Amino acid sequence: MAAFPSPVGGASLILAFRPYQKTVVVIGSGPLAATRAFAALEADARVVVVTRGGADAACEELRWRSQQQQLTIIDLDALPGSVTLAEDRDAGALDTYLSTISDLYLVCVTDTLLGADPSLQRSLDSANHIARICRARRILVNVADHPELCDFTFTSTHRFLDTQNGLPTALQIGVTTNGQGCRLAGRLRRELVTKLSKDVGGAVTKIGRMRNLAKETFDPIGDTAGGSSVAEFEFTPNTPVPQRQPSESARDIARRRMRWVAQVSEYWPISRLASLSSQEIGEVLEGNTGLAPSGIEDNTAVNSIHNLEVAPVVPRGQIFLVGSGPGHPSLLTLATHHALTRRADLVLSDKLVPAAVLALIPSRVEVKIARKFPGNADGAQNELMEAAIEAANRGLTVVRLKQGDPSVYGRAGEEILYFRARGFEPIVIPGVSSVLAGPTFAGIPVTQRGAAESFTVCTGVGRQGKEVTLPGYERSRTLVILMGVARLPQVLETLLSESLPFSRRSGPAYPPNTPIALIERASMPDQRVVCTTLESISAAMESLEQRPPGMLIIGWSILSLWDKGDMTVLDDGAETRDRERILSWLGDSRWRIIDGLDDRWETV
């Protein structure tokens, strides 16, 4: 039985090149050449792009980087050729040019990319010549889509950002399939990135700063480290960390500090490492483990953070902006259900979120309902936002629960900016929007071939109660108006008036016989749908008590799925049959009221 594993070929010797201030030559002018150039620039290399036609033939990114003096573009056609490779003028010219670069590090040939324009694609023979030239000069070469010519390959790479400042960090990961699936390597790299904490880049930055400080000479009594380096990998995480002694050499100090770097790297949470302040880094390295101040004989240990337990700090809370959907509990997304039932310490709910949804919240969770009423909407909104900040500062997870989708007239944007200005970046969980779900529950498609080619969503009231501009009539468009029922008279005037100021409607007036549906309490057991026309909706509503929330659907798509359906609304000359359509739809009545939800929803 073998004592050690047997090598199996087909893998790569994965290295990380650091061509600091060395020259990397990229041959080609397309997006792949730009990608290779950018990677080399981030590795602090000097980049020269060689391409036929020079800068004029280069892609936009390469031209921009050349204008910014980040790299140099050379016209391959302008280079003198070599007599030794007269059969391949490009390879001969490159042979002569490469011989002039004393610090040449790598060569990347990108214009061999399979699938490229054949008139621009380098032949395999020419790529072979270039590869032989590079090897003769002991220069590593990569040839795109020809692994047999490559001395090295590029991994599918991701560089992590520091979430505190948004800047790239030193942390990179790369995935390679060794030529067996480049596209798949990109997918695997993306999936790996999503599995890692967003704070990993910042953690590397802070550990890097800590390592550099640990290796600095600390010489209060004239001792030195003698130039010896102290490496973090000298110590395993379980290597004991000796207590500070009254007399330590600079090397002892550096070794003890580096042991702490190894310990916290292994055991502390990534998020904790990423959030370390300069003061905390200093405290970690100092190791307050019992040395008394100078001149004091009592060596009683002082508080230390080196027990591998994070110092007792109130953790920062989180804020979720969550959409509850149109109302029916079965339409909650899994993410919303999880936030309400497993994550929340406090739920701040809009008043229109139905009791059936609130009933899902565990009894241990505090629930507060918005005290919004006409004239107090802004005050109640501010009250909720302040309550969310106060709770999050106490370390609680706050779920700000909104009906429908938070971003569709749910004031999510205002709350995001408010919370961000106070140090919290909320997580927004989308909900099933009533814009789509409401009409669907009423049997109305917002788009339908032959009846509605598009739909527009707008609100019936602007900020602080101001009027809004409504869209003009377009036969092929469905109009959805949220928060317009309470202002129905103004909405009707805006849609129907022929003499209306242009500022209130952006287009022609609506015909009085245009279908309209008022959907109240969409998806709930007491859902009600009032179907009629613009000229009759006011009369239909006179004897009805409102059931908020309600929404208005206006357009010919309302008829499209009624009974046998009508897909001829957009046919040539269809307008002449509109009166017949309305009579077929409503019969002898001027309106129809459909009360209650389809019983089959009880089984969903």
Image (tube, rainbow, N blue to C red):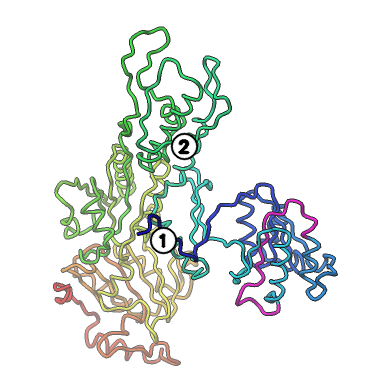
Q: Magenta residues: mostly which secondary structure?
A: loop
Q: Which quadrant of the figure contains the N terminus?
A: bottom left
Name the front one of labels 2 and 1: 2
Q: What amino acid type is highlighted by mark number 2? A: Glu
> How packed is label 1: few (under 14 Cα within 10 Å), some, or many (20 or more)?
few
Residue 595 included in the magenta stretch of the image = no
Q: Which quadrant of the figure contains the C terminus?
A: bottom left
478 shown above or below 78: below
Q: Mark 1 points at which residue?
A: 191
Q: Residue at x 57, y 24 (%)?
A: 226
Q: Which of 194 and 132 is in front in this view?
A: 132
Q: Which of 27 and 529 is in front in this view?
A: 27
Instruction: Say the numbered circle drawn on residue 232.
Output: 2
Indicate which disc, 2 or 1, sits on the residue closer to the N terminus: 1
Q: Is mark 2 on a helix, strand or loop?
A: helix
> How packed is label 2: few (under 14 Cα within 10 Å), some, or many (20 or more)?
some
- For the question of whether residue 546 can be seen, the reply is no
Start and end of the magenta stretch?
A: 98-119
Q: What element carries label 1?
A: helix
